[in-house]
Image (tube, rainbow, N blue to C red):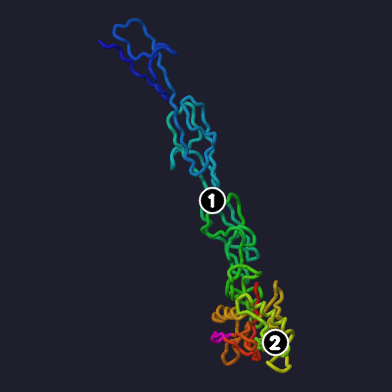
Amino acid sequence: MTGIIEENATKTGYTFEGWFDEETAGAQVTHIPSGSTGDITLYARWKVIEYTITYDSGGGTNHTDNPLGYTIETPNITLQEATKTGYSFEGWYDSPAGGNKTTHIAQGSTGNLALSARWTANTFTVTFDAEGGTNPAPSSVKVSYDAPYGDLATTSKEGYSFIGWWTEEGGKGSEIVATSIVAITADQTLYAKWGHTVGDIGPGGGYVFYDKGEYSNGWRFLEAAPAGWSGGDDDPVHYFGYYRPDQNNVKVGTSTEIGNGKSNTDTLVKAMGAQAYQGPSGDITTPYAAKIASDYKNGGIENDVWFLPSRDELNQMYVNLQLKNLGGFSSDPSDTCHYWSSSEATEKFIYDQDFHTGTLGAKLREEQHRVRPVRAF
């Protein structure tokens, strides 16, 4: 006949380790043999179950005081907030979506826990500074962290093209566009950046006809003097003039390239002075194209320095303005429609351009053709 087999006991939050004949220590009793006599007191022995707590911080950082486990005996646990840049912590939840908010784990609780952080993106006010432009519309917008900025303000400024909104004054820092992702952690001011594009009205009142792409040597853009710069309806006609030191007709020494119109003009004026020789011989002197251009003053602008364009600068003026009916140039073939450049072809011939056909050629210095000053800025 077999003995009595002792059944396992149960206790919430504990693992049953067995029956023992003493409350502590003693021997484990797994059965009572057949034929045994006498009263028997058996003591259940228990091991507390350790439960795990896992945290999904959703891209944030968990608080170091939040425990990774607990038992049924652990005193009440108050869960600490996680942190995440740009977000407000809404709480720990027992499900990634929906579920119940968990703020603490009460003593006596059981079971493994999987907690998910829930976040709300912070919102900030972005204010617009037009940097001299018209009042931005709107003056400010609300944005949310980690989301696109969305539609930004509009503004305008006479004589300038709007380049965009930038994070620092004077168009410095980083550009912000509608699709830029918000990464700020405080309210922000964006600053308008202004510039020029070919076809804009420049600071001197004339059309911008060339953009070299970046500032270097003190300039980026070339601007033609406005129509009527000389006081008349049409651009004036002038001799180019001769340089005759020692009665010999010679070249002053000029270039055809973009960026050399001013140095060409300075060189010509320095060599030929207040008036140039009208012809290849004789003593008649006359006002001349380079001096007329360099004497022009617009007034009211910085760097009010004008010059006769080089051959390649003149061609840019034709392509980017005249062909687009901008600038009010003289192009009637029945009248004089050739414009002087400041570039010498030979000691007798100067590069010019026909503003009716666009043809680049060379004309004798004693001829009279039209003058349009330009400036770099």
Give the quarter of the figure containing the C terminus. bottom right
Residue farthest to the left?
Answer: 1
On residue 145, the disc is: 1
* Residue to which mark 2 is pinned: 243
Residue 286 spot, x, y in % from top left: 72, 90
Q: Report if residue 373 is visible in the image.
A: yes
354 displayed left or right of 97: right
Give the quarter of the figure containing the N terminus. top left
Judging from the image, what secondary structure is the residue with disc 1 in?
loop
Comes first in the chain, label 1 or label 2:
1
Q: Going 64% across and 91% down the picture, which residue do you hit?
A: 367
Q: Going 72% across and 85% down the picture, which residue do you hit?
A: 272
Distance in Å between CA atoms under marks 1 and 2: 69 Å
Residue 165 spot, x, y in % from top left: 58, 61
> What is the three-letter code of the residue carrying label 2?
Tyr
Q: Is residue 296 magenta?
A: no
Residue 174 spot, x, y in % from top left: 58, 58
Q: Going 57% across and 92% down the picture, which residue do you hit?
A: 334
Q: Quadrant of residue 250?
A: bottom right
The chief SS type of the magenta part is loop
Judging from the image, what secondary structure is the residue with disc 2 in?
loop
Residue 200 spot, x, y in % from top left: 59, 73
**Quick one: label 2, few (<14), some, or many (20+) residues within 10 Å?**
many
Task: Judge whether 115 appears above or below 247 on screen.
Answer: above
Q: Quadrant of residue 297?
A: bottom right
**Circle 1 or circle 2, nearest the eye:** 2
